[in-house]
Image (cartoon, rainbow, N blue to C red):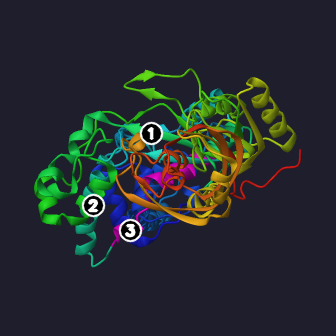
Amino acid sequence: MLPLKEKDKPVIQKLLSAGCCARCILRFCCVSVQAAYRQPHQDTLKELQAFISNTENTKSQDSTAAESAEGNNKSHDAAASEPSEDPPSKRAKLEPSVTEAPSEEDDAAVLKLKDEESRVCVVCLGILQELCGNTQAVKIAEAVKAEKYEFDTLVLSVSLPAQLCVREHSCWLHVKKELREKSMALDKDDVIQVKEAFKWIMQGQVAKELGGVAVVTRSSFEVGVEFTHPDTDADCHFLATTCPDCFKPTKNKQSVFTRMAVVKALEKISDAKFLKHYPCPPAHPTSSCISQDIQCLHVSVFVAGRYNKFCRSLPQTPWVIDGERRMESSVEELIAAAILSSFRASGFNFSSSGREDVDVRTLGNGRPFAMELLNPHRSRLNKVEMKQLQETINKSSDKIRVRDLQIVTREAMGRMKEGEEEKTKSYTALIWTQKPIQREDISFIDDIKDLTLDQKTPLRVLHRRALAVRQRVIHSMNTRFLDSHHFYLGLKTQAGTYIKEFVHGDFGRTKPNLCQLLNTDTDILELDVESVDVDWPPSIPE
């Protein structure tokens, strides 16, 4: 039995006559019992028709019973006064009674029921009719299996044509008028959404087709079902003239008539203006919605670690200038290749705690990095598998090496970015001087502490960084004399300090600089990053 009440009868009658399907009628009756939607919609339609005809049948039966009783009494009196000529035939009792042929009224009722079952719903455009049966469940399951994702649960998402909102609004106004005459009310927010009803019907069927996988409300794996109905796309167009401020073109959207924009417009438009531009109830569609390709999407997985770079001709990221690639590989690509393959991801985003120039090596414990793996088909690797993945990366090239490779959360990645400006970094630079020097000429540098620099954006990065003067601190320095024109300079600096510019001055854009301190032109021949003092990601014992 459907959980319906007497007050629902006028709503059911109104919507049946308007061309709504059985499940949409349940939605408008605010039925929230999920099982009611899962039974075949043909059975639900029969129950609804029986429900609204019950009162009329009861009255009709009472009237017929009274007339029958009166007729029986008269017949009994007549039988008593006139004796029967012949006794009843015994053979008559043994012969089965002949079933009466169906009446024309019965035939008409059957045809009417079949017609209502077959016609496309004016509100859901067939989505809650044949488009949410076993055929659809099989289609979804086959699409998921073909993609070969690894998952424990899934969430079903549904994308509906925006015009469904318009059609639902029209039917709501249609019912609202009827109920107002009967001093009753129906809150639009209480109407069950098409999406919800679709999920209630489909979740169990999809789970069954996938061998019992739980279909839940929240999951890292999403299976998207999209419906379109080109024949009725124009249903929304009148809203663009009545509520133009709700429809603004955007770069990424193919149409301004998004679901959100249509909902916003329907909230603003008055009932009178809506009814002036759109039929109430909606016009009968000639076809059902079209089910588009099933889309599967897994939430991103984040992998972090530290990398060393041993090559002075390897950029951190692909180096492309004016559309032309300058170097054959990069740190990012050497690390990403094996990781993408292991997680079977569709793509990635690479980030790190700062970056080194193409000719700079990164030594010591390495530089922290993280990768966001987009739509991974595999989301979990155990510690042994992560260790094997790390070894695969390290064997693939002698230009880089990774360590502490691990899966992290999105939130944990924030710790890497926090350290970019707050932490310190250590460097070793090979310095050339124009004037000949002695060991004593550079020894004073060892005593300099917390030297504050004013660094105007370097000329070499001005094309990608805003022009500004940034204050940075060199906490300490130490020197190692080589010969009359060369020495090693060790530096411990605030993160974000431009070391090359401190050495050669960048045409006076960095002050003070090493040229000023030594009173001679200086330049940097080699630079190594010795440590990036960010305590992340956690160290993993070798």
Q: Where residue 223 sits: x, y (%)?
A: 57, 41
Q: Earlier in the sequence, mark 2 or mark 3?
A: 3
Q: Main secondary structure of the magenta part?
A: helix
The residue identified by callout 3 is 189
Q: Which mark is residue 226?
A: 1
Tell me the quarter of the image containing the C terminus: top right
**Picture quadrant where residue 187 is located:** bottom left
Q: Where residue 308 sits: x, y (%)?
A: 71, 39
SS class, disc 2: helix
Label 2: few (<14), some (14–19) or many (≥20) C-alpha neighbours in 10 Å: some
The residue identified by callout 2 is 264
Depth check, front residue: 250 or 492? 492
Asked whether the beta carbons under mark 1 and mark 3 sit within 8 Å of each other, the answer is no
Name which residue lies at 28% across and 71% down: 179
Amino acid type, callout 1: Glu
Name which residue lies at 39% across and 23% down: 323
Amino acid type, callout 2: Lys
Amino acid type, callout 3: Asp
Part of the protein shown in magenta: 186-203
Asked whether the beta carbons under mark 1 and mark 2 sit within 8 Å of each other, the answer is no
Label 1: few (<14), some (14–19) or many (≥20) C-alpha neighbours in 10 Å: some
Would you say 437 lies left or right of 272 here?
right
